[in-house]
Image: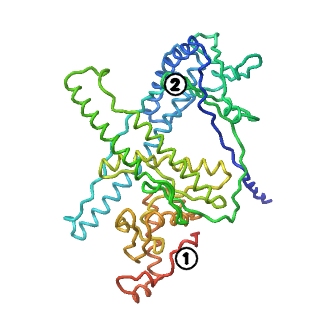
Amino acid sequence: MRKKKRKRKKKTKQTITRAVTHIRLIEANPGKLEALDQLVAVYLPLCQQYTTLFCEAETSPDKYQETVFKTDLSDRLHRVAIQQAAGIAKSVRTNRANAYQAYLEDVADYAQAKAKAQAEGRMSAFKRREPTWTEWDLPVLRVPVIQANVNVVVLEKSEDSTFDYWLRVSTLDVGNPLRVPVKLASYHKRALEGRTLNASTTLHKRNGVWWLTLSFDEDVPLQTKPDAPTVGVDVGIAHFLTTSTNKEYGSFHGKMARQHKHDREKRRRKAKLRACLEKKGVPKGKLPSTSSETSQRLSRHVKQEINRAVNALVKDHRDARLIYEDLNVASMRFKARVMNSYLYASHLGHIPEQLAWAAAKQGMAAHTVRAAYSSQECPRCHYVDRANRPNQKTFKCLVCGYADQADRKAAQTLAGRWGDRKLAACRSTSEVKALLMTRHEAWKQQNQQRIQDAGPPVQLSFWDPPEMFLESSHE
């Protein structure tokens, strides 16, 4: 007898984890804070050792790894350090693997372009640089952070004192846990009212001050209807977000770009001074630092502008389904160092994370699609070529002549990729390009007579509006 296929229950809600941050441990007496300093002085080097071990190992990081290094910490704290290190190493290895895969694909693309130039006898005009790979440095843990679970840190409700909670922390003195008082501000109490706290907590120290982070889970019902319109979202520097509805949000240009240029010049001067002093034999501990407070302020300012742009986008498209690119900033490279510095300062990698969070918080549906060649693909004939982008602002297809503003065209392409099963099944960018070129050849076969009648150059007014090429989805 044939078994009935089990119907998958439609997802009607999504669970998000909210963090309650900036809880300052100022009510603790100096002796208790000193005990925390002594704990982290042993905990952080141990976590660094396991992070290095996991990053250099050939196998995947295992949070259940048997203990390797000796320490004064208890077995439970030792296990927490291993789990924290495994999470850090897993993230680093994933990002490194993605960047290396993108490098291999760039090498293959370069070899193909070079072979094409040689076959056509235009090597004298071929000025494209061969991609190079720079091995990643091992992560260095500088900020004291303890990502603790209930085995080593417990938050207890206070009943008979002016404090709101007591934080019971296991220390180097086994059997004598440390009890740190926690006093919540009014906005902390409003955020936690009626909530059930998660068992995990985070302790970190910045500028000599200890901070506590709590979290709780919240179920948000999905508000997006199944037949909701799709809105593509393209991520960029000129405008942080550009939608397929022809709206732009936020920008790194202007004041922030000038601040970044000024800060970069300042750090370069400090780096030259540091190199000169190092040659003269100045001890490493007395060398000037290349980091600056202005750089940290600029980073926070950029992320705040990104958050404002994302919130404005979500507010304007409350009834839509957001489609955005699965961006990998680690693999993005420019030829000029100035542009690379400009790219990293714009914090583009923060945009997809914030977009997913803002949509989930509002109960909106947001999905990622493959970003490969979304800026180079023609939405009409699917032809892919770098030359389709003559400059940063313009897209113009070399084959059919389709032209549009580059970011808006990319957003429309991303929106059209939602529901494209064949494209989603591609495992690499080379497979994506092969699929798009196959579709281009099919388009040429269908429109061969029209192309001959139109003749070169193709007139844009001869073709139908670009919207008709974006409405149909590929099976």
Decide: is 203 above or below 388.
above
Q: Residue at x 53, y 50 (%)?
A: 352
Q: Quarter holding the N terminus?
A: bottom right
Task: Identify the image quadrant of residue 376.
Answer: bottom left
Residue bearing the label numbered 1: 468
Give the amino acid at mark 2.
Answer: Lys
431 or 165, which is in the foreground? 165
Point out the residue furthest to the bottom here.
Answer: 453
Residue bearing the label numbered 2: 205
Point out the residue furthest to the front here.
Answer: 255
Which disc is residue 416 wearing?
none
Point out the residue furthest to the right here.
Answer: 1
Q: Residue at x 48, y 19 (%)?
A: 69
Give the amino acid at mark 1.
Answer: Met
Q: Quarter holding the C terminus?
A: bottom right
Decide: is 335 above or below 284.
below
347 or 118, which is in the foreground? 347
